[in-house]
Image: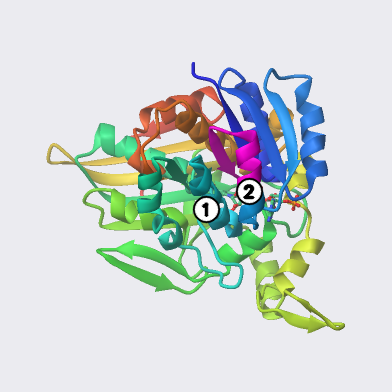
Amino acid sequence: MKMGRALIIGCGGVASVAINKCCQNSEVFEEICIASRTKSKCDTLKEKLESITKTKITTAKLDADDVNQLVKLIESYKPDVVLNLALPYQDLTIMDACLATKTHYIDTANYEPLDTAKFEYKWQWAYREKFEKAGITALLGCGFDPGVTGVFSAYAMKHYFDEIHYIDILDANAGDHGYPFATNFNPEINIREVTANGSYWDNGDWIETEPMEIKRIYNFPEIGNKDMYLLHHEELESLALNIKGIKRIRFFMTFGQSYLTHLKCLENVGMTSIEPIEFEGKMIVPLQFLKAVLPDPASLGPRTKGKTNIGCIFTGVKDGKTVHYYVYNVCDHQECYCEVGSQAISYTTGVPAMIGTMLVMNGSWRKPGVYNVEEFDPDPFMDALNKWGLPWQGTFNPTLVD
Ligand code: NDP
């Protein structure tokens, strides 16, 4: 097994899982450097892990908004790959630094400018030629959704379909943390995502909906009946281009009534706005203030009970016959907490981030340019999911979403 050195940027909920997993996989991750804005978090994690892993861990203080600092750190540490687990706002500066130092790049969320709550791939896809010329790989969106949902799509396409016509991505979280309102990952990013208009891809067009306008009830394996709502989601954009014959792709996420009622109320009073306002002589962004008073997602681990179920239902044709295929992973919040000290949302994102980094590092997922996960061979990734804590199941007889 080829060993290597990874620079991991960020030390929040998702990063701490990915770092735990790299340390479990020290055959591949010989050395890692954890670099983040708050270095004390990196040092605390290093202390916790270094007695139980062979991976050599170092830490660094880093402002990832600053390309010069990034380039300096990459030049001195000389990693084989950079795994970006900071926030979407840092994607482009980190990609610039990877270009300057000819280092491979991986992330889990597409770029979003701080002042417009609109995430799209166009900014990062614009780097394609530069990455090709530099001979380095950028692997975009390698969490669960986006990430594993793209791997599931490539796997279905490779093994079970000649053409996929319909994809429904279903993301259910039946976890209960006991708080009336909290978000499972970075509150600012989460609330920007769920308060935006919904949209789906239909016969070559984007159909836009009001936030939470389209609701369905679905009986999820190992979870039961849940209300789920149509959202716009990152992977719709890349799958619409990369899956042959696709006619419609939708993304649904489950939300409980308490979450929705609190969210509506916060929206109605202006607390979810990203427009700066003046408060006691200082400019503040209401959503950033809200983040400061909400529970830290990293603190939800010990309190959260229940399971997540995230998967994709495909409908298409193989040898002229209609085929339905549903592939999903079920993950238990408490089991994740016992293993790595985090709840399942961070776990289901951090594990694929480690796997993607491993595949780029060992050369199996490496080609010059900027790619989404579904553009690589899904098989080694699917095997690694089973090995590293996210086993998946498939059925050819799923209940379909109307
Ligand atoms: P957190 O807020 O828990 O962690 C973010 C980390 O980034 C923190 O350690 C933070 O530092 C650090 N950071 C922020 N800004 C900078 C900066 N300028 N320079 C250096 N470090 C910085 O977020 P999560 O772990 O919940 O999410 C991480 C990423 O994962 C996000 O991009 C999110 O969108 C993505 N995600 C993807 C999913 C998927 O399935 N694809 C699902 C869930 C999340 P500090 O400690 O100082 O705050």
One can see residue 144 in this view: no
Quadrant of the frame with the C terminus: bottom left
Give the residue displayed 67% in from the left and 62% down from the top. 188
Q: Amino acid at mark 2?
A: Leu
Marks 2 and 1, Cα distance to the nearest angstrom? 9 Å
Instruction: Residue under label 2, please give it.
Output: 70
Considering depth in this image, is 356 or 101 the residue closer to the camera?
101
The image shows residue 14, relative to residue 384, as above or below, that is: below
- The answer to if 40 sits in the magenta stretch is no
Q: Which residues are magenta?
A: 71-87
Task: Please provide percent x and percent y for residue 161.
Answer: 23, 38
Considering depth in this image, is 39 or 20 the residue closer to the camera?
39
Asked whether disc 2 touches disc 1, contact meaning CB atoms under 8 Å apart, the reply is: yes
Task: Please provide percent x and percent y for residue 368.
Answer: 37, 41
In the picture, residue 289 is in which quadrant? bottom right
Please report whichever mark, 2 or 1, sits nearer to the chain's N-terminal start: 2
